[in-house]
């Protein structure tokens, strides 16, 4: 590759990186990533039924992982 192409590639990548950093800093400074009411609204609008469904799904997931681990143990056979 030519030295000129490498210099152009480094310049463009530095420019893009600086642009991304500037956008991130602008977003943090102006509060674009702040969501103060997210957790309050989640607690306020969750119903008991949704909480029960979430707990049931967690139990099913644990049972499925336990069953999978037991099946894996059954398939293992040490060499003689």
Image (cartoon, rainbow, N blue to C red):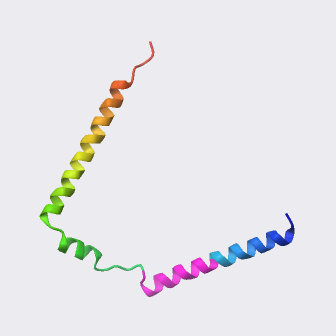
Q: Image point 14% across, 67% down: which residue?
A: 47
Compared across the picture, whether 11 is left or right of 33 comes to: right
Q: Position of residue 30 (x, y in %)?
A: 45, 87
Q: Image point 74% across, 72% down: which residue?
A: 10
Judged from this view, the residue extending furthest toward the left is 48
Q: Image point 58% across, 78% down: which residue?
A: 21
Q: Position of residue 25 (x, y in %)?
A: 52, 82
Q: Quadrant of residue 38?
A: bottom left
Compared across the picture, whether 65 is left or right of 19 comes to: left
Q: Image point 27% across, 46% down: which residue?
A: 61
Compared across the picture, whether 62 is left or right of 22 comes to: left
Judged from this view, the residue extending furthest toward the right is 2
Q: Nearer the viewer, residue 56 or 25?
A: 56
The N terminus is located in which quarter?
bottom right
The C terminus is located in which quarter?
top left
In this rendering, the count of numbered labels is: 0
Residue 14 counted in the magenta span: no
Q: Is residue 61 above or below residue 78?
A: below
- Magenta stretch, main secondary structure, is helix
Span of residues in magenta: 18-32
Judged from this view, the residue extending furthest toward the bottom is 30
Residue 27 counted in the magenta span: yes
Q: Quadrant of residue 37?
A: bottom left
Q: Position of residue 73 (x, y in %)?
A: 34, 28
Q: Is residue 50 above or below residue 14?
A: above
Q: Quadrant of residue 40?
A: bottom left
Compared across the picture, whether 33 is left or right of 39 comes to: right
């Amino acid at each position: 590759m030519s030295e000129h192409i490498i210099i152009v590639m480094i310049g463009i990548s530095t420019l893009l990186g600086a642009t991304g950093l500037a956008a991130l800093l602008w977003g943090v400074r102006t509060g674009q990533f702040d969501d103060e009411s997210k957790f309050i609204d989640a607690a306020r609008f969750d119903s008991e039924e949704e909480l029960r469904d979430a707990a049931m799904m967690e139990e099913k997931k644990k049972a499925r992982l336990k069953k999978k681990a037991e099946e894996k143990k059954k398939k293992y056979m040490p060499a003689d």
